[in-house]
Image (cartoon, grey):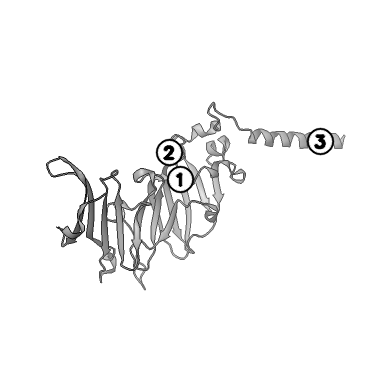
Amino acid sequence: MKKLLLFLFISISFNASAADDLVEYMDNGLPKHYELLDGKTPIYIEFTDVIQGRYIVDVEWFPDWGLVPMFNGPANINFKLVDRDVKFTIKTDFFNIGNRMFSFPKYRINANTIANKEVIKMKYSDIANEPFAFGDMNFDGVKELVIANRRQGQRHHDAYEVYLIQEIKDTSYFNIMDLTDTLPYSNIDATTEFDSDNKTIQLYYSGGACSSSYETYKRVFSDYPLRDYNFELIHKIDYETWDEDGNDMPCTKYVYDVVDGKEILDEAKSGTVD
């Protein structure tokens, strides 16, 4: 009798677990619970490792399975310093951890997980394509916070949001400055080139076969710590296939030096191109 009861208990437990793991699929072959990921339903993620040796991070993410890439969506990324009573939140529109998260068995993201708003705990170091990172974007030796906007740049490249982390030595001052509307930070994407030797950033603007342009910005350092993040435009290249009157012409390259905000044409480096 005891063996029979034990057998029944094991059978019931196994079947309940199997039912919980049962996944229904839509006609397009995707799991049906993806329909819950509509850009309005949150998924809560808590990273279990300390990031950059100083940040504890959790995320409220609103993935949308109908966007490209799949699961792009708004998010509130919450940071907390491990050694100080400092917290801050970055709101972004195109957060994405990747499709693998929804198919990786150990995270068990299914209809119940989503409906019950369970907190998903995971190691940030396990993510192959990091949704945010820290890097020196302005050659001052201090790492900025960089948020990836998956495939939101030109020609479906990733674009990036840059946030300046301002701290003053021997003080408790801590501030996050949003640089998403400040050039050249505002137009940084996967095509941007950084030259740490010359302290320059080159932005590329794709406009087609002969309608693209390049802008080179050079770092301008300041003795005032809270203002020490600026660049100035020093060089510009434009490719054009029409003249000032709108008439067609051979593909022509225009090279400019920019001095005190004024564009000066370099005729020796300008001209028609093959």
71 or 77: nearer the eye? Answer: 71
Camera sees residue 126: yes
27 or 15: nearer the eye? Answer: 27
Residue located beneath label 3 in the image: 7
The kind of residue tagged 1 is: Asn
Residue plotted at (12% across, 41% down): 245
Q: Residue 96: which disc?
A: 1
Q: Residue 216: which disc?
A: none
Label 3 crowd bin: few (<14), some (14–19), many (20+), radius 10 Å: few
Task: Where is residue 13? Give x, y as percent.
Answer: 73, 36
The kind of residue tagged 2 is: Val
The kind of residue tagged 3 is: Phe
Residue plotted at (81% across, 36% down): 7
Q: Could you tell which of marks 2 and 1 lies nearer the N-terminus?
A: 2
Residue located beneath label 2 in the image: 68
Q: Is 259 positioned to the left or the right of 5 in the image? A: left
Camera sees residue 174: no
Task: Where is residue 180? Give x, y as percent.
Answer: 31, 52
Label 2 crowd bin: few (<14), some (14–19), many (20+), radius 10 Å: few
273 or 114: nearer the eye? Answer: 273
Residue plotted at (54% across, 44% down): 100
User: Is residue 68 placed above or below 47 in the rendered structure?
Assistant: above
Q: Could you tell which of marks 1 and 3 lies nearer the N-terminus?
A: 3
Q: Could you tell which of marks 3 and 2 lies nearer the N-terminus?
A: 3
Q: Is 24 positioned to the left or the right of 7 in the image? A: left
Marks 2 and 1, how far apart at CA: 11 Å
Tell us which disc is closer to us: 2 or 1: 2
Tell us which disc is closer to us: 3 or 2: 2
> How many numbered circles are shown?
3
Q: Is 154 positioned to the left or the right of 39 in the image? A: left
